[in-house]
Structure formats: C-alpha cells, structure tokens
Image (tube, rainbow, N blue to C red):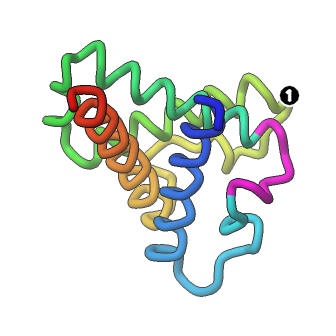
Amino acid sequence: MSDNDHGGQIFREAWITGVTTHFPGTPKDSYITPWENTPDDWERVSAAAVYRQVVDFIKVTDGAAARLSAELKGQFVAICWIGQILARIPDPKPGYIAPWDQLPEWQQKTDIGIFEAIERDVTAAEVTADS
C-alpha cells in the first residue's frame, strides 16, 4: 500500500466512523463508501493530502499539536479540506467551503475525529519505528 493510500484510507475510515456515529438519520451512500470503492479520484487525492497536512503539522510542532482543543483540531482538518476543494473543484457549492461555524455539528465532530485518528496513526508509527 502506498503512503498516499495509507493516509487516504486513515482519513476515509475516520470520516466514515464520524458519519456513522454523528450524522442524524441515514447518511447518503457516498458518505460511507469505503476507501477502496471511493470513485472520485479528487476525493482520494484530497483525503491523502489532508492526512499529510495533519501529519506535517503534528511533526513541525514536535507533537505539541496534541495540546490543541478538540475544536481547533477539527478546524484544522476543515480548513485543509476546504483548500483541497478550492484546488480541485472550479466552482464548488457554498456548503463545500463553509466556515467552521456554519458546518453542521455532525461534520464538526467528524473532523475532530479525523484529526484524532491521524494523531493515533502517527503515534503508532512512531512506536513501531522505535521498536
């Protein structure tokens, strides 16, 4: 598995976990499509890019990013995702690039979970590398 696939898969699995936990009602099928069945290349590339951005942020802060509040962690993921949308979709729907305070609560909680899942993955990789 390539690094991009690994990172994108961690992102996607955390997204699906968040959606299935926090989404009110029944989510759209596209919200819970597993990584290997995600059809849109831009989504796969974007998920991997956001994963890398979070990893880089954790590393350049020497792990101090762990002390951020849950809300700030989620905001970081949200802004990274908006950057990917703007880079890949010429005229995105306003909801795709909505600021944090306009995102539904389920999406905020999901973005927090994505940051935390990436943190766990980075920690696990460091422990494995140290062994």
Which quadrant would the N terminus be assigned to in this image? top right
Whether residue 38 appears in magenta in the rendering, the answer is: yes
Whether residue 74 is situated above or below residue 88 in the rendered picture: below
**Towards the viewer: 129 or 120:** 129
State the image coordinates of residue 111 (x, y, percent, origin top left): 44, 51
**Residue to which mark 1 is pinned:** 90
Q: Quadrant of residue 58?
A: top left
Q: Residue furthest front?
A: 131
Residue 37 occupies which quadrant of the picture? bottom right
Let me know if residue 105 is in the magenta part. no
The amino acid marked with disc number 1 is Pro
Return the x and y of residue 68 as percentages of the image width and height: 19, 36
The secondary structure making up most of the magenta span is: helix
Residue located 58% across and 44% down the image: 98
x%, y% of residue 123? 26, 37
Specify the farthest residue to the bottom: 25
| Label 1: which secondary element | loop
**Vertical placement of 28 versus 45: above or below?**
below
Residue drawn at the location 29% of the way across and 39% of the way down: 72
Question: Magenta stretch?
Answer: 35-42
Please give left or right for residue 22 compared with residue 94 in the image: left
Q: Quadrant of the C terminus?
A: top left
Q: Nearer the viewer, residue 66 or 91?
A: 66
- Establish if 124 lies above or below 80: below
Q: Residue at x 64, y 84 (%)?
A: 26
Residue drawn at 51 percent across, 41 percent down? 99
Looking at this view, name the residue that lies furthest to the top: 60
Q: Quadrant of residue 74?
A: top left
